[in-house]
């Protein structure tokens, strides 16, 4: 065998291995590599991490994971009682002390409380004297066709998923700039990369944040401030219980079936911790076929959109019949 054949076989083998990894994976190739060969999440030990939306789902699981890695935590959500339970669970597990975890109840729609001078930010700085990482995880999903979704719902979804994390990030940014160090993390979604029937307002809010984060990343590059966008696919959480419908006063109220094809919040949190430790710009965290869709839309957008137009009609029909029926089979 000549040297050219050997090199060709090597590259073909590498290509096959990558394809196998892709189809067996639950994250993008960059994140897979970082999980195996990158910085350990243990490098986050001692970091002060502020997590919003920490009372359930991904936020709660991320709190447990980062506490196990030795991080000091600021936990925020509206349900203070639930946050106190999570704090006690972490302490009982031997990962943290009372002083290592600060509970800061917050209504993210109260933008006036997000200024750098406000009591919310100052309370965190007085307790820990610094903030290393801000994880904007709070958000609310939405299920309704665009034609039936009132502007009131559109506005509320954008305020919760887009304007509130922008507002809180701007409140923390002066501290990051003063320290010349910081890390902004945002829990986006596959819907932040790909539009989907029944998720118009939600996809809009996540797409908007993707653009804002890309701009922020460039602006902060020379200030040693990092920006990570996390795009999860289906994850077990309370998202469908609280999701908006075609009425701002009504929630979907659907509890996820344990038999559904979804990632656990624990696995999702573990991968997010890896992304944070390795300061990755954007990561995809999802089972298939959503992960495959992301690759198609990223590298073959015209073909992917044609496929979506054809195969998305089944989902449109299900949404028209009733949004709850959609989640009985998917």
Image (tube, rainbow, N blue to C red):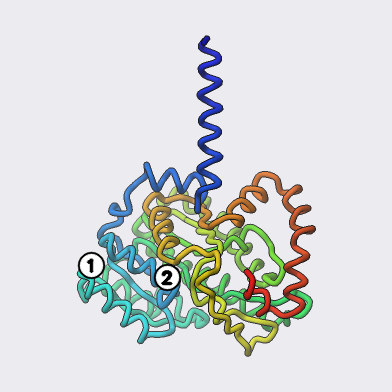
- Name which of mark 2 and mark 1 comes first in the sequence: 2
The kind of secondary structure element at disc 2 is helix
Q: Would you say 230 lies left or right of 202 here?
A: left
Residue density around tag 2, few if under 14, some if 14–19, many if 20 or more, within 10 Å: many
Label at residue 220: none
**Residue 123 location in percent, x, y?**
32, 77
In the rendered picture of this protein, how many numbered marks are placed on residues?
2
**Residue 137 location in percent, x, y?**
47, 69
* Mark 2, residue position: 59
* Mark 1, residue position: 95
The kind of secondary structure element at disc 1 is loop
In this rendered view, identify the residue nearer to me: 88 or 225: 88
Residue density around tag 1, few if under 14, some if 14–19, many if 20 or more, within 10 Å: some
Q: Residue at x 39, y 77 (%)?
A: 76
Q: Residue at x 49, y 63 (%)?
A: 263
Q: Quadrant of the C terminus?
A: bottom right
Query: Is residue 17 positioned above or below 188 on the image?
Result: above
Q: Residue at x 44, y 66 (%)?
A: 265
Q: Can you name the residue that lies furthest to the top here?
A: 2
**Residue 159 location in percent, x, y?**
59, 76
């Amino acid at each position: 065998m000549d040297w050219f054949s050997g090199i060709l076989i090597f590259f073909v083998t590498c290509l096959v291995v990558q394809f196998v990894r892709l189809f067996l994976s639950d994250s993008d190739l960059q994140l897979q590599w970082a999980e195996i060969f990158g910085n350990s999440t243990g490098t986050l030990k001692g970091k002060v991490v502020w997590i919003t939306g920490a009372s359930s789902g991904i936020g709660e699981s991320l709190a447990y994971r980062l506490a196990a890695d030795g991080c000091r935590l600021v936990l925020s959500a509206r349900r203070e009682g639930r946050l106190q339970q999570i704090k006690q669970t972490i302490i009982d597990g031997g990962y943290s002390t009372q002083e290592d975890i600060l509970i800061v109840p917050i209504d993210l729609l109260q933008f006036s409380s997000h200024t750098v001078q406000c009591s919310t930010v100052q309370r965190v700085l007085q307790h820990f004297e610094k903030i290393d990482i801000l994880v904007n995880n709070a958000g609310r999903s939405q299920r309704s066709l665009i034609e039936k979704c009132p502007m009131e719902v559109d506005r509320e979804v954008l305020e919760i998923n887009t304007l509130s994390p922008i507002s809180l990030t701007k409140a923390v940014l002066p501290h990051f700039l003063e320290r010349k160090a910081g890390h902004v993390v945002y829990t986006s979604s596959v819907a932040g990369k790909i539009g989907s029937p029944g998720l118009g307002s939600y996809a809009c809010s996540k797409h908007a944040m993707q653009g804002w984060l890309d701009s922020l990343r460039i602006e902060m590059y020379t200030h040693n401030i990092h920006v990570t966008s996390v795009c999860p696919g289906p994850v077990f959480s309370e998202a469908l219980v609280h999701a908006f419908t075609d009425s701002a006063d009504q929630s979907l109220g659907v509890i996820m079936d344990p038999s559904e094809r979804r990632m656990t919040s624990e696995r999702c949190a573990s991968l997010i911790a890896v992304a944070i430790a390795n300061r990755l710009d954007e990561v995809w965290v999802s089972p298939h076929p959503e992960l495959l869709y992301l690759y198609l839309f990223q590298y073959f957008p015209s073909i992917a959109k044609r496929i979506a137009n054809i195969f998305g009609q089944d989902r449109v029909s299900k949404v028209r019949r009733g949004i709850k029926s959609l989640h009985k089979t998917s």
